[in-house]
Amino acid sequence: MLDLLAGFVSELRSAGLPVSLTENLDAMEAVQHIPIEDRQAFKYALGATLVKNNAHWRAFETVFEVYFSLRGPEYSIAEGDGEFDDMWREMQEQMREGDGKGAQGGGLDSLTPEELAQLLMQALMNGDQAMMRALARQAVQRFAGMEPGRPVGGTYYLYRTLRNLDLEAMLEKLMEASRQQAGELTDLEERLEHDEYNHRIEEFKKEIEAEIRRRLVADRGAEAMAKTLRKPLPEDVEFMHASRDEMQNLKKALQPLTRKLAARLARKRRHGRKGALDFRNTVRHSLSYGGVPAEPKFKYPRPAKPELMVIADISGSVAAFARFTLMLVYAMQGQFSKVRSFVFIDGIDEVTDYFKGEEDIAQAIHRVNTEADVVWVDGHSDYGHAFEDFWERYGKGIGPKTTVLLLGDARNNYHASQAWVVKEMRQKARHVYWLNPEPRSYWNTGDSIVGDYGTHTDGVFECRNLRQLEAFVEKLA
Amino acid sequence: MAHRFESVQQVRDGLKSVNYLADEGIAGVVFIADRLGKPVLIEGPAGTGKTQLAKSIAETTGARLIRLQCYEGLDESKALYEWNYKKQLLRIQADKNSDSWSDVHDDIFSDEFLLTRPLLEAITADDPVVLLIDEVDRVEVETEALLLEILSEYQVSIPELGTITAKQIPLVFLTSNNTRELSEALKRRCLYLHVDYPDMDREKEIVLTKVPGVSENLADQIARIVRSIRQLDLKKAPSVSETIDWARTLVLLGIESIDAQQAKETLHILLKYQTDIAKAAKELSVDK
């Protein structure tokens, strides 16, 4: 047991979760109080002792599943293979009985795909968990075409299974069926039914995924499997290569992050040093000492909030990064006295107004992507022209309180760099920073000329993921 | 030491008897906390019953709840202990002539002159207590250090008196709304519990137990609508307490089953931002 736990913890660590020694010891003590058969409680006991950040919970769950629920019989925790098989057999017997009446004979295995689909639809309709699980097994067995030792990832099997099941059409059919059942549905009911079925189908998908994983682990062993399933934590996902799912997670992670950052910055600003003597307040407090100003009071310092100008490249390769930074900056614009934003590809346009009076930042970003006039000639990044244009049209706006943020990979398609603009900016502005979403090792390779611009800025920062972006923004305000 | 709970199931049943419906995660963590004698750090969105959990545990175990509400500027004298200056002064003046200096000196730093604050009170209590440290994320990082000794050792060191150790280990709950990252040192000493919005079935149960006079059918509808709303991309998703408020309103209005119009008219109880309300109203009435 202890060996198993040690392996589990080291896998968590390699997945990027910070597990300290004391936490490890706590976990070992905790599991002694929980009967190992109670899988849910066991999971939460481990989770409570090892995972101290909710964003890491998903990673934990995956590793847990691989390590515990899918182990061979000697380790298997309840709901593991043994019990499951019993249930499965029971299901099949029930099926047989049912089939007997229908005079078809045979178990789930001998059903035609159409009958299988029919069964699945019924199960989804009634929210029958056990049946859904059994069907997930059957579907994987039948459609995934898994062969031992085949070096294919789980996603491939998942894709194959889902393609055969055609769950999209299933949703339509379900809606149709419930419409028939209840007669006419109001819009609200329709919407609720839709969500309900969607939810059940999602659950069914998860069952399938778990089933595929279960089989893969049986084939390859837990350690190898855990390694292939290892995914970066939300804060470590790279902007430039994030998948759609990861993008969603990133967006979710962004909101609490801005709240945290704003709270931290506000606190930092208030609790700096003490300000000048507050005469009025001191006299007021001297009354409780009989008129002796025994306790001097000071004014809170109110350091000026920086003014921010964000100039972002929104061409394809770095668009996601620009979007994120803009979101982050606007989500915490209370921390800056003024924020102006500009976007460019080879032409430049001011987009500050899109964010004004728009409560929904995502909506504003959408407008930036669709409405901003950023194409000058051919829609390939031209930093030189964009900067020159910026300097002519908006350069006057830069003052000694302004901090300028330049976002982009500086891949200039071999156009002229016009680096003098950045140099001029730096002379007028308080700070000029460059944020580059590319890994440092790619800088100044190919058509990247970040070095040309970088020499004129106060610093070039690598911002590949949320963690780095957060660190930078904190430094900024 | 005697444990408060025999099994995870007992925790659930106990909580249920005081109208708190715990899921497996919550009950499991409380059980482990009791066994290991460790504090529980509860995080999660506002209005999901974090504080209520501590209250309910106190109620079901028959313990006294001692609550420390955290805020910026909280310090030792408000959280741990304070010397009763006035009383000390009186003591010195009363014995001006009789006692020698050293007697007085030893005397004025004794238990009699100590004002206990929540944390000290929790560990010196003779009766069973549950200590709730509410919204711990509001104190500054430096003040967090104040809590560390009591959380890991269940003791308080007072320079003039020595170390006061707990007579019994209280159940400790810390809640956080996650406005800032808590320090590693604090997290390490606690068990971590994330309380999220309940799933649909549990929410329905909660509505049924918390709102008198609600019908099964209405509760089901409420839970389903709230789940749909939570899936939208909102500024602030409706919390459990808002769901309950909404259910109460609907019961008061005498509504047996909600239609889109009624839902739209009462949305402002569930959502607190105009943009959110508009969005939800639009989504709920559009058929897909």
Image (cartoon, coloured by chain):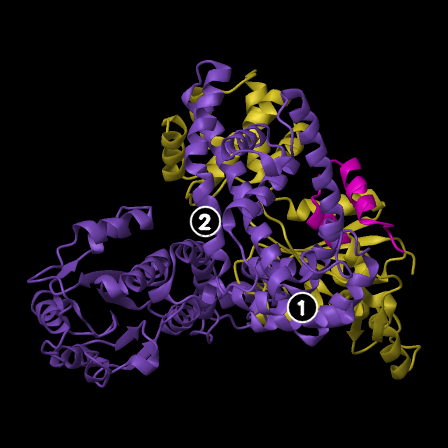
Q: Residue furthest top?
A: A183
Q: Position of residue B271 (x, y in %)?
A: 46, 36
**For the point 15% across and 72% down, which residue is it?**
A383
Say if A302 sits above or below B5 in the image. below
Three-letter code, disc 1: Phe
How far apart in space, not on screen, are marks 2 and 1 (Cα)?
30 Å
SS assignment at label 2: helix
Q: Nearer the viewer, residue A58 or B7?
A: A58
Three-letter code, disc 2: Arg
Q: Position of residue A71 (x, y in %)?
A: 70, 60
* Quarter holding residue A426: bottom left
Give the residue at mark 1.
A8
Q: Are marks 2 and 1 on the same chain?
A: yes
Q: Residues within 10 Å of mark 1 (few under 14, many from 20)?
A: many
**For the point 67% across and 32% down, which residue is it?**
B205
Pinpoint the chain carrying mark 1. A
Judging from the image, what is the letter of the chain drawn in purple? Answer: A
Q: Nearer the viewer, residue B260 or B106?
A: B260
Q: Nearer the viewer, residue B287 or A270?
A: B287
From which residue to which does the magenta span run? B3-30
Give the residue at mark 2.
A160
Q: Nearer the viewer, residue A65 or A292?
A: A65
* Quarter holding residue A275: bottom left
**For the point 34% across and 81% down, which residue is it?**
A440
Pinpoint the chain carrying mark 2. A
